Amino acid sequence: MCGSGATAGCERATGSVSRMTRYHGPVSDHFDGKTFFDPDGAPPKSLGEVLRWQFGGGRNRHTWPDWVENTHTDIPPSVVDSGARLSFVGHASWLIQSAGQNILIDPVWSDRASPLAFAGPKRHNAPGIAFDKLPRIDTVLVSHGHYDHLDLTTLSRLAVTFNPRVITPLGNDLTMHSADPAIRAEAFDWYDRVELGGGLAVTLVPTRHWSARGMFDRNEALWASFVLETPAGKLYVVCDSGYGDGVHFRRVRDAHGPLRLAILPIGAYEPRWFMKDQHMNPSDAVKAFADCGAPQALAHHHATFQLTDEAMDAPAKALDVALDAAGVSREMFVALKPGQVFEI
């Protein structure tokens, strides 16, 4: 699964052509001086486990349609002054507009989530917003270094067009700056709160995941989720995460609640034995929704890049089943399609 957050080994199944620039900093409760770790998480899968998944017997990889035309296309307003407007671009990419500020989350406009132009996971639908229809972008939030989240081509294009601030966890700024010094990347640690202007702020919070760009740079840069403070309330943006025992979500509830809305991943989860520690399935996401305490959730991280083995439409269907089983209204946890908008 080149470009996904499950393992660098499967990301680089086509060949390791990139790696992160190593971060150097003080030792902490989640950095040992060389690599980052999650005290409440799980290490990434071994190369042997990657090979077992990719080439072992009994694999059930569903075939996705080569291309699916979007049923929605968004042309955002230049600014949104009251409330918050969330436009789903696709996969884990969002445009969030509030208080006169325009913020992109994990922007990927490239055709592939890969370091290679000719190989690796390719898009199966267009971005829900055409790049030339974007409003002025003030800030970009990049959650971690996997190729389906940190897209250097898109970040360079944004730098040329808008010159936004790029807020990212420790070490990912080095990857960006080494590729393009024009990217205005600023790196922060877990629990750091960053003022964005206009009454907006973002706090980086732990998430159950990991990071890499190649075979030999696992966890040399940090990963995070975001709590975005807006006049419409706090938005909890989880770009990639496993569930574990749910402690990460409950801690955000306790430290940052009440939350107004959560954006939670529901895709890239099969086979479960391989993916469960780093990627939630829809049932896990419904539990995370309950744990974080938000009254509303939006689903993402599905149906754009085929990173794992489930069918393209499986996550959205399974989300409805999981919501019904938990007795939660389907309207409370919605899987938007690219180009659809949700306003609060």
Image (cartoon, grey):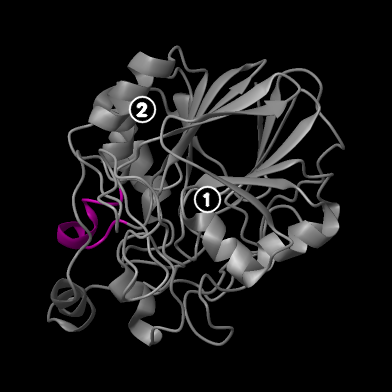
Q: Is residue 322 left or right of residue 42?
A: right
Q: Furthest residue to the top?
A: 258
Residue 31 seen from this side: yes
Residue 21, image x, y percentages: 46, 67
Q: Which residue is drawn at 67% across and 23% down?
A: 200
Q: From the viewer's side, name the closer residue of 303 and 321.
A: 303
Instruction: Determine whether label 1 and label 2 are within 8 Å by CB.
Output: no
- For label 2, count other residues whose C-alpha is less than 10 Å away and answer few (under 14), some (14-19) or many (20+): many
Say the numbered circle drawn on residue 283. none
Q: From the viewer's side, name the closer residue of 303 and 68.
A: 303
SS at circle 1: loop
Residue 27, image x, y percentages: 29, 45
Q: Which amino acid does label 1 sit on?
A: Ala
Q: Which residue is drawn at 69% across and 25% down?
A: 84
Q: Furthest residue to the front?
A: 26
Residue topped by disc 1: 92
Q: Which amino acid does label 2 sit on?
A: Phe
- Position of residue 327 relative to residue 146, above or below, is above
Q: Which quadrant of the rendered structure holds the N terminus? A: bottom left
Q: In which quarter of the image is residue 100?
A: top right
Residue 119, image x, y percentages: 50, 85
Q: Give the range drawn in magenta.
A: 269-279
- For label 1, count other residues whose C-alpha is less than 10 Å away and answer few (under 14), some (14-19) or many (20+): many
- Position of residue 22 relative to residue 54, above or below, is above
Residue 68 seen from this side: no
Say the numbered circle drawn on residue 289. 2
Q: Which residue is drawn at 77% across and 31% down?
A: 101
Decide whether residue 160 is among the magenta residues. Answer: no
Question: Disc 1 or 2, which lies upstream in sequence?
Answer: 1
